[in-house]
Amino acid sequence: MRLRACSSALATAALTVGLTAAAPPGQAVGPGAFLDRLHTVAPVASTVPGNGDVNPYGTFTIERSIGDLRRGNVLVSNFNDQANLQGTGTTLVQIAPNGTATTFATIDPAHLPGPCPGGVGLTTALTVLPGGWVVVGSLPTVDGTSATAKAGCLLVLDRHGTVRETIAGDGINGPWDMTAVSFGGRSELFVTNVLNGTVAAGGAEVDRGTVLRITLCDEGDRPPRRIATTEIGSNFPERTDPAALVVGPTGVGLGRDGTLYVADTVLSRITAIPHALTRDHSAGTGRVVTSGGSLNGPLGMAVTPGGDLLTVNGQDGNIVETTPGGRQIATKQINAEGNPAGAGALFGLALDLDHDAVYFVNDADNTLEVLE
């Protein structure tokens, strides 16, 4: 795709300034781990909407009230339909801290405004951009099996939950998770992709997972316009899985210095891609920050006010805190359901607006919960 400038794009030298402004407030952060201050897990609300969708994945805390979006509420995307078929969920649920839940959007795969190869199955890739534009990933299947998984797309919804645009192709192939930063009329989406050769490999591991930086320009009342797609990460291991559909690079978090951290789920590690906002080529899998230890199939990721990385494990129900230097400084079990305990229960997570609690989805019983 040919690169064009946003009408209000910032100079390259100003990108880090924009990132700093969008980062969590610079409140004083005392010694010790962020997780050491959190002690209680409590349910907030069911994530099951009226149509019966289950398997909540994406989790995002809304920062500003606009349209039907309310500041402080949490958006949750559902990956499965009421028959529990993976890659067929079509709903976004909005949940208030007091437990009030409403359906923000029910997406009709047959009436999309643009291409989304395979249809709709909403993933962990979820964010809200300035103007109330909700962007959510779709990795769809026909029957809940990896054999029918298709490339999907990013769906762009307006502040009232109507799909206004699809972003497909140009490297988007199974968008699995995402983080974003916005400044001066410009947004950068960082999207992991897990279907590059995965289905054809039939369960064998392939090293073709990618991270894309997708640059969008604000268009006011019209959906944001994609002006560039850059592959900044590649060669991540990925494979199909009968229980999880697909396993590949998942959580992503952006540090204040412009480093993008990636949860490499297959190898139970976190890697770092430097200069993620400005680089024009792939860093491969990046530098290994930490590997093994308490990490056990890390999935969703969030960045604390002090810059530490929070990841949730897909295999044991634990949340792990890692410093940017690679020290794993805290681990807490936040889910013990199932056998083995906590396996398959966790996916997306997000800090609350005060940055003193963590929202996370519990796939074992289809709820949003909070660690505080």
Image (spheres, helix red, strand yellow):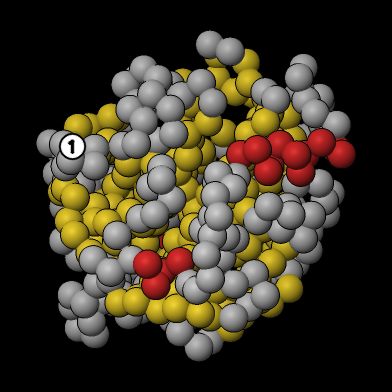
Type of amino acid at the residue the image marks with label 1? Ala
In this view, the residue in front, 29 or 64, is 29
In this view, the residue in front, 119 or 124, is 124
Residue occupying the point 45% across, 43% down: 126
Measured along the vertical axis of the image, is residue 11 above or below residue 275? above
Rendered image quadrant of residue 13: top right
User: Is 195 situated left or right of 246 in this image?
Assistant: right
Residue occupying the point 33% across, 27% down: 70
Quarter of the image for the N terminus: give it: top right
Q: Count neighbours of disc 1 (C-alpha within 10 A) and say few if under 14, some if 14 to 19, many if 20 or more.
A: many
Measured along the vertical axis of the image, is residue 47 above or below residue 166? below
In this view, the residue in front, 293 or 87, is 293
Residue occupying the point 57% across, 33% down: 167
Q: Does the rendering let one see residue 83? A: yes
In this view, the residue in front, 333 or 118, is 333
Measured along the vertical axis of the image, is residue 332 above or below residue 58? below
User: Is 162 situated left or right of 323 in this image?
Assistant: left
Measured along the vertical axis of the image, is residue 165 above or below residue 209? above
State the residue lying farthest toward the bottom. Answer: 293
User: Is 165 situated left or right of 101 in this image?
Assistant: right
Q: Which residue is mark 1?
A: 101
Residue occupying the point 31% across, 37% down: 73
